[in-house]
Image (tube, rainbow, N blue to C red):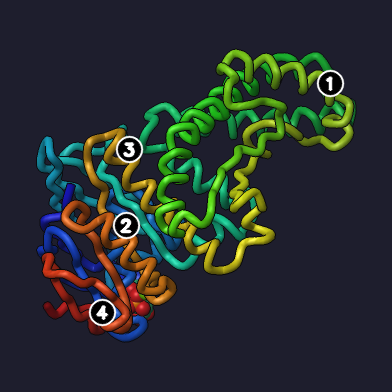
Amino acid sequence: MFLKRLELTNFRNYLRQDIEPGLLFNILTGKNAQGKTNILESIYLCCTGRSFRTLKEKELINWESEFSLIRCLLETSRREIELKALLKPGQKKIKVNGALARGYPLGWPGVVLFTPDDMVIIKGSPQERRRFLDSEIGPFNPQYGYYLNRYQRVLVQRNNLLREVREKKSKNDLLQAWNEQYCHYGSKIIFIRLALLKKANPIIRKLYRELTGDSEEIDIRYHSSVKIDYSFSEHEIFTRLTAELASIKKEEIERAQSLIGPHRDDLVFLINGNDAKVYGSQGQQRTIVLTLKIAQIQMWNNELSEYPILLLDDVLFELDSLRQKALFSRVKDKVQTFVTSTEAENINISGDFYKKLYTVKRGNILS
Ligand SMILES: Nc1ncnc2c1ncn2[C@@H]1O[C@H](COP(=O)(O)OP(=O)(O)O)[C@@H](O)[C@H]1O
Ligand SMILES: [Mg+2]
């Protein structure tokens, strides 16, 4: 899949800008605060329905303007897609080939984004790792977002009820009704996560070995708050979750909190058996993130027979030339890539494959 044309109107510091990107490498260079990341953000927004920098759509609209419009023309192996994102204060409308889009269905225009902030996948809180996992599963499982949404609603209600039971405002047996739904959606979420990890793990292990010259092994474990393992069926997870909830009922009421379930789970990255969050060097942690990103691209292709667009925002100077080569050798000739950097020299793309170079200056793109 590739982006044939991008048109921006009043988006961030761009008033009017059209570009026709190249099929493979597109390199955006320029000084700081000129609008390089804004371009990646606009592509990401069209393809996922949200920004990776803000939840407030208003910030995306040019300060001097009342609205913002992004138009993307994409070509996939199956069809041509026109995406339009119209933003007004407090309003966001996304149209796909002229029709208003509700959700983002399976196989939706894929983007893989890689920024220096992605180190939080390793170093950050469990919540960051869950967020990563959830956003990665979404494109491969059309129901996942729905289950997650339902679970989160039930979780809020259940926590409220636990508080009421503690304060004796509600009866204990009301919990039973909520537990049913809680375990229903909770077990679905855990099951889908495990299934994705089962598929991703061999890909990640192979890549990591290649990237480290066979000297290191990676293993990703799903660290669940419920005592389950990879061999469990959805029903077995449901049963286990239900049983464990019953056994911690008193504690949950005392603390007025749901203490087990997918919202309490985490991922652990082990390098040669040691937790990379605690023991990994900066270099090893970077290699893990790089591995995850390449694995995402390969999974897209395995699952959906399509390559996503790759957005690399300011990451290249963090990757030494060996890691850059490892990345580029796996995406060249296949993946349309947008790279930003303050210095074109930071980018070690060798070989004679196609590159398009853009210079970004104060919300203008000069090719
Ligand atoms: N809504 C907006 N309207 C106008 N300018 C904006 C808006 N949001 C951000 N900017 C400007 O965009 C620039 C930052 O763009 P960015 O793409 O992050 O820069 P970089 O080239 O460093 O990646 C800054 O100059 C900022 O003031
Ligand atoms: Mg930037």
Task: Judge from the rendering whether residue 151 lies leftward or rightward of residue 142; answer left or right.
Answer: right
Q: Earlier in the sequence, mark 4 or mark 2?
A: 4
Q: Which residue is mark 1?
A: 247
| Image side of residue 196 versus residue 127, left or right | left
Which callout, 4 or 3, points to the residue nearer the camera? 4
User: Which type of secondary structure does the marked residue at label 3 adopt?
Assistant: loop
The residue that disc 2 covers is: 88
Q: Measure the C-alpha gap from mark 1 to mark 2.
A: 50 Å
Callout 4 secondary element: strand
**Circle nearer the N terminus (4, 3):** 4
Alpha-carbon distance for marks 4 and 1? 58 Å
Crowding at dot 2, Cα within 10 Å, few <14 / some 14-19 / many 20+, comes out as some
Horizontal and vertical percent position of residue 254: 89, 33
Q: Nearer the viewer, residue 340 or 302?
A: 302
Q: Which residue is mark 4?
A: 29
Q: Which quadrant of the structure image shows residue 98?
A: top left
Residue at screen point 26% across, 79% down: 29
Please tell me in which quadrant of the rendered image residue 301 appears. Answer: top left
Q: Quadrant of ligand 1?
A: bottom left
Residue 185 picture location, percent across and down: 57, 23
**Picture residue at 25% right of the left edge, 53% below the top:** 309
* Front disc: 3 or 2: 3
The structure residue drawn at horizontal position 70% and vertical position 18%, both measured from the top left corner, is: 240
Q: Earlier in the sequence, mark 3 or mark 1?
A: 3
Residue that badge 3 annotates: 104
